[in-house]
Image (cartoon, rainbow, N blue to C red):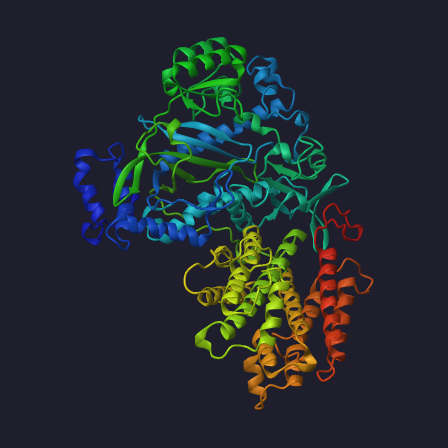
């Protein structure tokens, strides 16, 4: 009965959703859930009730609410060929699947994963399946995804596959079938997790009312499964990405953070003596496993593609030596070829002794004459496409045979005669539909379901209870025209029994306390350091522009600055490369000059250009920065209001970013590098300002402007009742260790950070960056405000530049620099 599976009583009067009443009114005449069981229908009623209980009488408000939660989590993706990320399209209506129906799917996925493991082990082993005629040799060695160097390589732990995915469709008969398999670089588990997090915030009452299966046990099992194949009890695991231009990079960053994996790129890694290491600020640290999210042909230029610049030379040797687990092993992608599905029934009979629980859609490989004849004679009822990954001269991808004109059919038939092995025909799968929020109400839309399986610590497969749904934007239910879908949705597996609250958190008694935040790769430290520098640089430049605008341009701010003061302010801006010197200091020319310095898209030193650099770093640091910080960094440049209004908006954004870094980042080495960048850049900005002024002859207006730029007006007025005097102003800006905007404060903070960062030797001798910091400290201590001159300021500025270079040389990646012997460690 439905009451056995559903918690809580449905009350029609409790809902305010007009769309739900309209749905009920038409349900008897054309219910989109007509094929559902009583239990499933009751579960859908609960889900609709939760949706209708959200503010607003239409589903448009619910859709926007779910989308906002997805944005808050940081869910995004990038379409192939695009540089800008897109919002992840999340529907507020989840797909509901009962526990009994899901059990069939999960068992079929686990069986399919085992079948694939046996097949790929044979392909990379003795190749008996080819010898027995079960698999054509052409299907294996003719595939561009077959990697010959992997033949004979036994992966650590003995398993080729650790993580697999499949796209499923449910036909009109209610049976689930496989549309496509994903074993090379399975994508989407992070999106499934993010969908669940967003829907948990949107429909918070569903988990308890529907006994929803949780995702956390699956990810815990996956992590434990990879760890179990490693040689160390507490292995270091990395998620290998190709970088921010990867379409699913946001998903990868989220998964790395959630699972506690290091997010690494090829340049972060190095192989020495068949052992894989990650370059960190503390030297080389051993990596025991990689969850690979890049094309396997690119991971090792010595083994596969010699032109690859994103791989790790020697990685396959390290794998063959048993020193690093790669999940999934290179070469498994041969199983993804569409033509492979034509042989799965025979493979299942051979290896399982029966037909698979989850069958693939009907597939005919044209490399067999009978199949080719069938495809050509039944073209109107089939989808025809490349047999392997990539394209063919006649086909860029799968197409409906019925859509081909006479000329196209003739060319296709001729191509099949020349190279029949390059083509497959597949049946046109009719997808079932699910309720979807369209416009103001519910509409049926076709969907496909991506399901994920991971190998646990015991070697058995664990299937994620759910996955994510891709929903077509048109009512056409044919899988061939659905494409990638225009929406995604959470998948809820519900059942009669309560679900225990499980997370990745272990019990308090089983966890050894740690206050070490873990490994910090050199590339990450480099990014955070320059993020701090760019933010301070942009804020400093904006401060000069605002002072110039506020005193010399705006009629509402009083008298204009003296020409001499305007002169050195303009020079500071021009020297940054933000804008060319104005032809004159007339109001109109200064306005144009300031606008270019703040908003130019062409100059390399404008505020907008600096912010663009900071945004780029934020995009590749999602695993280290909060969602709020990434969103602030990614916020568009303001375009409304006056120039001063836009400058104010940017200033408030800088203040918010500074607050987030100061109050929300843990005091780890990652934060220290970020703050080091800020302190060095702030000190250098102060020296550049002091160098622009003739300190011996500075006027009262010059001194007041110096205090404005150092954000020290209030501090000065609290200390001195007199007007602006040269020596007190210089002391406050340059030498006062208590002024958080002054040079002395920055130097003192820099020294503290450097003392806490790791060193590569234990001889007790200061490293170059520490020696330069000591010289800066001595220079500040020996400085005297009444004798401070241009030479002193110039020396401090030069030492700060040398310090930045020394930090980069010591801690950051330096192109093809040799591995540091002193940093070699098996930690």
Query: Residue 73 location, x and y as percent?
Result: 45, 53
Tell me if 777 is positioned left or right of 260 in this view. Answer: right
Query: Residue 343 location, x and y as percent?
Result: 50, 18
| Residue positioned 44% across, 9% down in the render | 373
The image shows residue 334, relative to residue 99, as above or below, that is above
| Residue positioned 20% across, 34% down in the render | 30
Q: In which quarter of the image is residue 517?
A: bottom right
**Residue lying farthest bottom?**
721
Q: How many numbered tags mark residues here?
A: 0
The image shows residue 581, relative to residue 128, as above or below, that is below
Tell me if 471 is positioned left or right of 745 in this view. Answer: left
Query: Residue 513 location, x and y as percent?
Result: 60, 60
| Residue positioned 41% across, 47% down in the render | 196
Tell me if 617 is positioned left or right of 20 in this view. Answer: right
Query: Residue 567 location, x and y as percent?
Result: 61, 72
Front residue of 564/485: it is 564
Is any atom of residue 784 visible in this view?
yes
The image shows residue 484, relative to residue 345, as above or below, that is below
Is any atom of residue 515 visible in this view?
no
Quadrant for the N terminus in the image: top left
């Amino acid at each position: 009965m439905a009451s056995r599976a559903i918690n809580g009583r449905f009350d029609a009067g409790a809902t305010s959703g007009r769309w739900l009443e309209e749905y009920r009114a038409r349900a008897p005449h054309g219910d989109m859930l007509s094929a559902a069981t009583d239990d499933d229908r009751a579960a859908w009623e609960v889900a609709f009730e939760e949706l209708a209980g959200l503010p607003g009488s239409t589903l448009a408000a619910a859709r926007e609410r779910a989308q906002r939660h997805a944005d808050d989590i940081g869910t995004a993706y990038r379409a192939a060929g695009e540089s800008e990320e897109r919002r992840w399209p999340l529907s507020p209506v989840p797909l509901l699947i009962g526990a009994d129906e899901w059990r069939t799917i999960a068992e079929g996925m686990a069986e399919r994963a085992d079948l694939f493991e046996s097949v790929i082990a044979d392909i990379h082993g003795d190749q008996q399946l080819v010898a027995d005629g079960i698999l054509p040799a052409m299907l294996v060695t003719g595939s561009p995804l077959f990697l010959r160097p992997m033949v004979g390589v036994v992966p650590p732990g003995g398993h080729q596959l650790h993580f697999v995915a499949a796209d499923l469709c449910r036909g009109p008969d209610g049976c689930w079938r496989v549309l496509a398999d994903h074993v090379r670089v399975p994508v989407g588990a992070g999106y499934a997790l993010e969908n669940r997090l967003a829907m948990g915030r949107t429909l918070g009452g569903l988990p308890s009312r529907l006994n929803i299966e949780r995702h956390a046990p699956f990810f815990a099992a996956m992590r434990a499964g990879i760890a179990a194949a490693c040689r160390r009890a507490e292995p270091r695991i990395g998620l290998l990405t190709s970088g921010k231009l990867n379409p699913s990079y946001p998903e990868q960053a989220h998964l790395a953070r959630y699972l506690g994996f290091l997010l690494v790129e090829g340049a972060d890694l190095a192989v020495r003596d068949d052992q894989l290491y990650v370059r960190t600020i503390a030297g080389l640290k051993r990596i025991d496993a990689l969850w690979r999210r890049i094309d396997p042909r690119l991971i090792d230029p010595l083994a596969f593609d010699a032109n690859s610049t994103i791989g790790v030379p020697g990685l396959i040797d390290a794998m063959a030596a048993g020193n690093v687990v790669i999940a999934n092993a290179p070469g498994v992608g041969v199983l993804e070829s569409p033509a492979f599905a034509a042989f799965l029934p025979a493979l299942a009979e051979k290896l399982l002794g029966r037909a698979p629980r989850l069958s693939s859609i009907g597939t005919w490989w044209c490399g067999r004459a009978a199949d080719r004849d069938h495809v050509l004679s039944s073209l109107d009822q089939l989808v025809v496409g490349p047999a392997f990954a990539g394209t063919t001269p006649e086909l860029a991808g799968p197409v409906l045979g019925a859509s081909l004109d006479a000329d196209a059919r003739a060319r296709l038939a001729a191509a099949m005669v020349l190279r029949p092995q390059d083509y497959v025909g597949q049946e046109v799968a009719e997808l079932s539909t699910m309720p979807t929020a369209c416009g103001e109400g519910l509409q049926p839309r076709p969907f496909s379901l991506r399901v994920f399986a991971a190998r646990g610590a015991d070697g058995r497969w664990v299937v994620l209870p759910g996955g994510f749904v891709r929903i077509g934007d048109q009512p056409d239910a044919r899988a061939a025209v659905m494409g990638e879908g225009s929406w995604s949705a959470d998948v809820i597996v519900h059942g009669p029994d309560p679900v225990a609250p499980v997370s990745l958190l272990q019990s308090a008694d089983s966890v050894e306390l740690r206050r070490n935040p873990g490994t910090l790769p050199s590339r990450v430290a480099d990014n955070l350091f320059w993020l701090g520098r760019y933010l301070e640089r942009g804020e400093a430049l904006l401060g000069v522009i605002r002072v110039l605008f506020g005193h010399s341009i705006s009629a509402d701010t009083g008298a204009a600055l003296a020409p001499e003061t305007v002169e050195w302010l303009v020079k500071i801006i021009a020297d940054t490369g933000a804008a060319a010197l104005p032809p004159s200091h007339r109001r109109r020319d200064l306005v144009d000059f300031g606008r270019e310095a703040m908003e130019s898209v062409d100059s390399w030193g404008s505020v907008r250009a600096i912010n663009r650099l900071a945004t780029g770093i934020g995009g590749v640091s999602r695993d280290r920065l909060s969602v709020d910080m990434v969103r602030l960094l990614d916020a568009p440049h303001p375009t409304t209001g006056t120039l001063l209004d836009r400058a104010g908006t940017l200033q408030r954004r800088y203040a918010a970013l500074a607050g987030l870094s100061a109050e929300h980042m843990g005091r780890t080495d990652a934060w220290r590098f970020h703050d080091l960048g800020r302190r060095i850049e702030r000190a250098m900005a102060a020296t550049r300002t002091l160098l622009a002024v003739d300190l011996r002859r500075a006027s009262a207006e010059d001194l007041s402007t110096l205090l404005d730029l150092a954000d020290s007006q209030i501090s000065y007025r609290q200390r001195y009742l007199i007007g602006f005097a040269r020596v007190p102003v210089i002391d406050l800006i340059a030498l006062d260790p208590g002024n958080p905007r002054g040079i002395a404060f920055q130097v003192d903070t820099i020294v503290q950070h450097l003392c806490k960062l790791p060193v590569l030797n234990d001889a007790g001798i200061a490293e170059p960056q520490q020696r330069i910091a000591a010289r800066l400290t001595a220079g500040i201590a020996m400085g005297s405000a009444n004798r401070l001159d241009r030479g002193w300021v110039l020396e401090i500025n030069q030492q700060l530049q040398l310090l930045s270079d020394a930090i980069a040389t010591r801690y950051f990646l330096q192109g093809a620099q040799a591995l540091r012997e002193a940093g070699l460690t098996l930690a």
